[in-house]
Amino acid sequence: MSFAVIQTGGKQYKVKSGEILKIEKLENSKAESKVEFKEVLAYGDDKNLELGEPTISGAKVEADLLENGKNRTILIFKKRRRKNSRRKNGHRQQFSLIRINKIISKDGKIISEAEKIKKKDLEIKSEKKVGTK
């Protein structure tokens, strides 16, 4: 089972091919487009591990951008007692939903590749996700 550790949006993620992730919103990206992550910190499998210092040059992870969206509203309510002072604020964090396709080593070899997914299967999964709210 091969994996890679990538850095995006100020965070680090351990990813496997075929995995669906919710990450910080990627700027200037449209849904159903290809995305490459070139900041690979490490990759390997159960036996081998390649570490970067801090990144591995030439290694990359390819992914499909499924959708851009916003999370649920988080309410921020501040009250100062006995002073009749309160403040209510809300925030909706933006995110990008991606599916990892390939993990490519620094030599250009494909370490791991996800199975092809049909659009019909993807639509069924998204309908299930929407229905659970």
Image (spheres, rainbow, N blue to C red):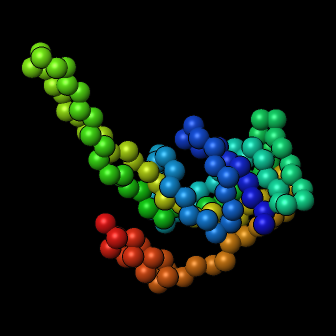
Q: Position of residue 106 (x, y in %)?
A: 84, 52
Let me know if residue 28 appears in the view: no
- The quarter of the picture where the C terminus appears is bottom left
Q: Position of residue 20 (x, y in %)?
A: 56, 64
Q: Position of residue 111 (x, y in %)?
A: 81, 64
Residue furthest to the top in view is: 83
Residue furthest to the front in view is: 82
Total count of labels: 0
Residue 79 found in image quarter? top left
Residue furthest to the right in view is: 47
Q: Position of residue 81 (x, y in %)?
A: 16, 20
Residue lying at 68% horizontally and 66% vertically, measured from the top left = 17
Q: Is residue 78 above or below residue 114?
A: above
Let me know if residue 74 appears in the view: yes
Residue lying at 45% horizontally and 76% vertically, measured from the top left = 125
Q: Nearer the viewer, residue 69 or 71?
A: 71
Residue lying at 12% horizontally and 17% vertically, measured from the top left = 82
- The quarter of the picture where the N terminus appears is bottom right
Residue 15 found in image quarter? bottom right
Q: Is residue 126 left or right of residue 131?
A: right
